[in-house]
């Protein structure tokens, strides 16, 4: 379990009204549908979206499990698919049919299989919609006549029913992205290279680890996929940390990958963040030297590029499990971006470098690393949070620690760690909630219900 990870970051996004280009007269919904504008300017409706006339080379249509699937695709092999979930019973962004059409046809041009999933007859209440995402992906793959990428063979039970060699839609995809209306996805956005770590720092790491320093490793990159609203209004973000470059693929344990996709149903933007494997040290050795800086740099990058994706950087909630909880676990400490923490790992390793040679530069270094809240799983998060060196429990904790939710793994040691962390936090006046994880089967017992409610409450979602 610790070999994989998940981290999720949500942003509640108060927005400027000018980010949205639309008129109420253009709303493509029933006449009696009521569009609502929240106090922050968000405009959503419960009205129905009619069938969307997408231009594509081919079109398949079927109904699975009470959901109508229209599959659009252009010729050519595709390793990505999107499920555009309409009429889910949740409020939807107010867009014209033309804008929906433009979003989906752009995805087709980028060789996505586009699957419009119409929920108008499904009528799943509340959190049951989020929990349906696992079955939704199976149903959508079947509707698209798609098959798992061959690497899915490492978990053969997940593609028993998939066709072995042929797909009518030419879809060979492990990555099925759930999108709410008005959202799109960008794949493999590069934000960090190993060469961003100063060369003296990289050489010192290699020397201490007894490994050769290879300058060519500088080109190795960390990437993410991002789901975001195309026209606005700004909504939210979720981040998925993984243990290797292929960690986003859905043959990994479902309590991780599908947890990520479930939160797309909240009208949140989503970042699938790849967990970076240090070219010299791998995991976790590399993070032992610069993990604080990596965490701070990533959040600053997201804030610094937020306007491009209609993201408001002022409220952030992070979720992580197992090894993926390391970065959000660091960010619970609102002092993480300050000097005593920023260089704490380097200083602990006694590398004796000048400040400029141990600093990972960021174009957004002036931005805060604060987050609104965190939802943390067992393992690394618990271990880090036991240490006074990692979190300033005795330094105005109610000011410097973000509220957090933490759930305990099935192992007795992590349950004990969790109880200790919760007791310490509560004694210091930090807002904290907890639940014991009673299964590693999606949707992980009642843990998802409580984590979902915690996010809604902390982010004050009005839509």
Image (cartoon, helix red, strand yellow):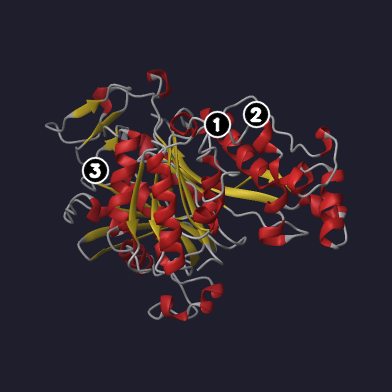
In the displayed structure, 418 sits above or below 428; it is below
Position of residue 2 measured from the top left corner of the image (x, y, whole percent): 53, 66
Pointer 1 local density, CA inside 10 Å: few below 14, some 14–19, many at least 20: many
Helix, strand or loop at mark 3: loop
Pointer 2 local density, CA inside 10 Å: few below 14, some 14–19, many at least 20: some
Residue corresponding to mark 3: 90
Q: Quadrant of the C terminus?
A: top left
Q: Indicate which label's residue lies in the foreground, 1 or 3.
A: 1
Q: Which of 246 and 412 is in front in this view?
A: 412
Helix, strand or loop at mark 2: loop
Helix, strand or loop at mark 1: helix
Q: Decide: marks 2, 1 in contact (CB < 8 A)?
A: yes
Q: Is residue 216 left or right of residue 232?
A: right
Q: Residue at x 51, y 53 (%)?
A: 381
Decide which of tag 3 and tag 2 comes sooner along the chain. 3
Residue corresponding to mark 1: 303
């Amino acid at each position: 379990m610790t070999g994989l990870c998940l981290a999720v970051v949500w942003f509640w996004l108060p927005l400027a009204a000018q980010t949205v280009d639309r008129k109420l007269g253009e709303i493509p919904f029933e006449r009696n549908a009521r569009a609502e504008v929240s106090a922050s300017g968000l405009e959503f409706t419960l009205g129905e979206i009619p069938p969307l006339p997408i231009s594509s080379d081919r079109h398949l249509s079927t109904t699975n499990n009470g959901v109508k699937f229209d599959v659009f695709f252009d010729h050519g092999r595709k390793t990505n698919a999107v499920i555009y979930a309409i009429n889910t019973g949740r409020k939807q962004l107010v867009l014209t049919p033309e804008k929906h059409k433009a979003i989906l046809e752009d995805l087709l041009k980028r060789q996505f299989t586009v699957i419009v999933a119409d929920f108008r007859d499904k009528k799943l209440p509340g959190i049951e919609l989020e929990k349906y995402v696992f079955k939704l992906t199976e149903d959508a793959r079947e509707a698209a006549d798609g098959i798992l990428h061959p690497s899915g063979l490492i978990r053969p039970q997940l593609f028993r029913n998939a066709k072995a060699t042929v797909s009518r839609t030419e879809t060979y995809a492990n990555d099925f992205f759930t999108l709410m209306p008005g959202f799109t996805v960008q794949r493999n956005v590069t934000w960090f290279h190993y060469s961003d770590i100063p060369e003296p720092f990289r050489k010192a790491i290699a020397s201490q680890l007894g490994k050769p320093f290879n300058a060519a490793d500088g080109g190795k990159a960390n990437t993410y996929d991002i789901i975001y609203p195309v026209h606005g209004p700004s909504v939210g973000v979720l981040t998925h940390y993984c243990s290797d470059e292929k960690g986003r693929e859905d043959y990994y344990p479902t309590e991780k990958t599908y947890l990520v996709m479930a939160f797309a149903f909240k009208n949140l933007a989503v970042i699938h963040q790849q967990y970076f494997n240090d070219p010299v040290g791998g995991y976790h050795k590399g993070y032992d030297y610069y993990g604080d800086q990596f965490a701070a740099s990533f959040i600053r990058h997201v804030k610094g590029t937020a306007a491009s994706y209609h993201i408001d950087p002022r409220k952030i909630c992070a979720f992580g499990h197992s090894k993926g909880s390391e970065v959000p676990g660091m960010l619970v400490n609102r002092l993480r971006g300050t000097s005593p923490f920023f260089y704490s790992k380097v200083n602990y390793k006694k590398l004796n470098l000048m400040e400029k040679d141990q600093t990972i530069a960021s174009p957004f270094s002036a931005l805060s690393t604060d987050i609104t809240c965190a939802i943390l799983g067992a393992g690394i998060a618990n271990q880090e949070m036991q240490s006074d060196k990692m979190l300033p429990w005795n330094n105005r904790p109610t000011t410097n620690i973000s509220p957090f939710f933490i759930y305990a793994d099935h192992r007795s040691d992590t349950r004990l760690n969790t109880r200790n962390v919760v007791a310490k936090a509560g004694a210091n006046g930090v807002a904290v909630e907890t639940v014991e994880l009673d299964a590693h089967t999606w949707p992980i017992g009642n843990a998802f219900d409580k984590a979902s409610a915690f996010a809604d409450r902390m982010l004050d979602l009005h839509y």
